[in-house]
Structures are given as C-alpha cells and as structure tokens.
Image: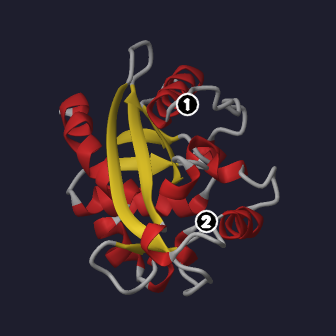
Amino acid sequence: MTRVVLATRNAHKVAELGQILGALGLTIELVGLDAYPEAPEVAETGATFAANALLKAEAVAAATGQPAIADDSGLCVDALNGMPGIFSARWAGGGGDAANLDLVLAQIADVPDERRGAAFVCAAALALPGRSGEVAEGEVRGHLLRERRGTNGFGYDPIFVPEGESRTTAEMGAEEKNALSHRGRAFRALAPLIERAFG
C-alpha cells in the first residue's frame, strides 16, 4: 500500500481526506505530519491558494521522501473583496477559529442579508519526491449568517450556509459536509491525479 503524507498536523483534515479518498476506492495509507516530527513547517508565502498548496506539498515530499498532498483553503467574503482569503486561518492575528469568526462577523455587521455572499475555496496539490506538483481546486458558494449555528466542523463553518441549504456546514454530519464542501470538491478533483500517479 502506498503511503501518502498529508501536509498538516490537523487531525480533522487527515480524517476528512481519509473519508473522501476511501469513498473513491483509493487504497493508500494516509498519514499526517505527526508521523514525521522532523518535517518542516512550511511558510505559506504564496499569493494564491494554489501556490500555497504546491509549496507545502513539494516541501513535504522532499522532506519525507514520500508522495505528499497539501491543501490551502479559506473563506472569500464578497463584501470584503474576497478577504480573508488566503489569510483565513490567521485573520484575527493568531487568536484561533473563534477570534477569526468574530472578526469577520464584526466586519460585515452592517452588510444587508442580500449582500452577505461568500465562498469557501480550496486548492489541493499532489507532489511526488523530485517532481513538480499538480493542483486541483474546489469551491462552494453560499452566504453568511449573523450568528453561529451548529457545533460540527471548524473554522467558519458555524456561519456559512451553502447555496440550496438552510443549514450551516456546522449543522451537517461529516459525510454530508464532505459531499458538498470545497475541500471535498478539491480532493475529488485531485483523485484522478492520485490514481494516475499510483496506477
């Protein structure tokens, strides 16, 4: 079985990608960076989600000698000109998910409901040691609520309602969320590249 390193120490992401790839019938051993404590933390210095995903995948493949997958994702709010975007995880300056969410809510407090459009965007990259990586992207459109609803998920999930839904992504079960999430869409788009890479 091929071992693939997911360039994260976030157990949520490892579990989520494991479920997505399992549903696609790919038989790979997926591990997070906790399996490689010596692997470097890769600075996200790219100007786009795709650039950051490639930076991380290529660096982790080089450091571990194993195929690596990385993603970069975030919330792009229409009323904030697409921000927080690539800065989503550190929008409030390192205060964590709750602080980031509070800051976005405060910044769009005066925006009327019909202009609270937003999208979750994800770029996922696959890199093999010594080779340039490849990227796939996924996006889900929706709108932002004025207060939190739901306790599943993480990040901005409690205020994001996908198009065609009445629930936030934090009110959905893992399988439901994965079926429509930006990360699910990006990783499903990446799956043919993974299959081609590993035959």
Q: In what quadrant of the picture does the N terminus appear?
A: top left
Residue depth check, mark 1 versus mark 2: number of the one nearer the observer: 2
Identify the amino acid type marked 1.
Lys
Tell which of 153 and 34 is nearer to you: 153
Q: Secondary structure at mark 1?
A: helix
Q: Which of the two discs, 1 and 2, labels the residue nearer the N terminus?
A: 1
- Amino acid on which the number 2 mark rests in the picture: Gly
Kindly indicate the quadrant of the structure image that contains residue 3.
Answer: top left
Residue at 41% across / 85% down in the picture?
A: 167
| Position of the C terminus by quadrant | top left
- Asked whether residue 69 is in view, the answer is yes
Relative to 179, residue 48 above or below: above
Return the x and y of residue 43 as percentages of the image width and height.
68, 30
Badge 1 density bin: few <14, some 14–19, many ≥20, Cα 10 Å:
many
Say whether residue 76 is left or right of residue 127.
right
Disc on res. 155: 2
Considering depth in this image, is 154 or 116 the residue closer to the camera?
116
Residue holding disc 1: 56
- Dividing the picture into quadrants, the one containing residue 185 is bottom left
| x and y, in percent, of residue 151 in the image | 58, 85
Q: Position of residue 126 (x, y in %)?
A: 38, 32
Residue 186 shown left or right of residue 48 in the figure: left
Kindly report the distance in space between the C-alpha atoms of the residues bearing marks 1 and 2.
20 Å
